[in-house]
Image: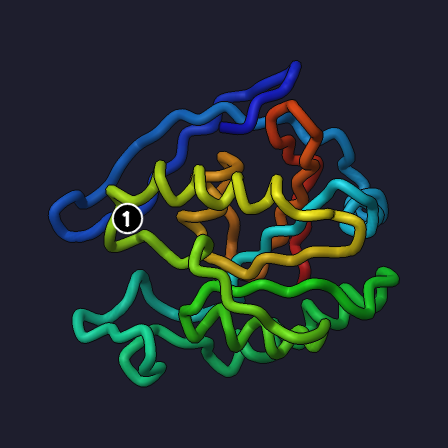
Amino acid sequence: MITGMMKINIVYSWLLPARITAAMLILPIAVAAWSDDSQIWEAVKTDGHIALLRHALAPGTGDPPAFQLDDCTTQRNLSDQGRAQAKQIGDRFRENGIPAAEVYSSQWCRCLDTAALLSLGKVKQLEAINSFFQNFERREEQTASLEKWIRSRTLNEPVVLITHQVNITALTGNFAAAGELIVVRVPEGAPLEVVGTLQTN
């Protein structure tokens, strides 16, 4: 859980699988230390930070009943608007002095497509950021695994993880919109801290 010297409580809801229609949670989140966009972009370039990006626009919620990980035709995918949005997000990175990054993606097609369209470098698949929307019992274990992975990294160059709303919310307490960037500081021996969010299009 992300904490900080100053906290605010945010109440939000998300849709869950049919057996649980909704959940209302109260999570503490760190107050953003940097509110200026240029400072937040600078954090992406600064050692000890990581950027979490929710995939671009993909109409709908969750995935169809026949969902298969290795078959994009069975999944909820980026719309034309989402594909254009992903390209614009890549442009925003470059405009802010980030022409390349370590890019990791969920194995879901809408995340892989977003990652590829950013054009920031080779895309690596990372199971720890796969959606658990339809297997919500995995939330705690998977989030702990993701934090462990983040802390194992040498964060001396920009690192971008393209993932899902539920994963970002579980790790940071922030509800990310499609294409929204959440920048996190990874201090040694201290809790993760959200330093800011960016609407990237």
Q: Quadrant of residue 121?
A: bottom right
Task: Compare residues 134 and 7 and report the one nearer the observer.
Answer: 134
Element at badge 1? strand
Q: Is residue 59 above or below residue 135?
A: below
Task: Compare residues 4 and 31 and report the one nearer the observer.
Answer: 4
Which residue appears at 60% of the width and 77% of the height? Answer: 116
Q: Quadrant of the C terminus?
A: bottom right
The residue tagged 1 is 15
Q: Is residue 81 above or below residue 5?
A: below
Which residue appears at 81% of the width and 44% of the height? Answer: 47
Q: Is residue 114 above or below residue 137?
A: below
Within-10-Å neighbours for mark 1: few <14, some 14–19, many 20+: some
Which residue appears at 66% of the width and 73% of the height? Answer: 118
Task: Compare residues 139 and 85 and report the one nearer the observer.
Answer: 139
Q: Quadrant of residue 164?
A: bottom left
The x, y position of residue 34, in whole percent, is: 78, 34
The amino acid at mark 1 is: Leu
The x, y position of residue 130, in whole percent, is: 41, 58
Q: Quadrant of residue 3?
A: top right
Q: Is residue 189 above or below residue 17?
A: above
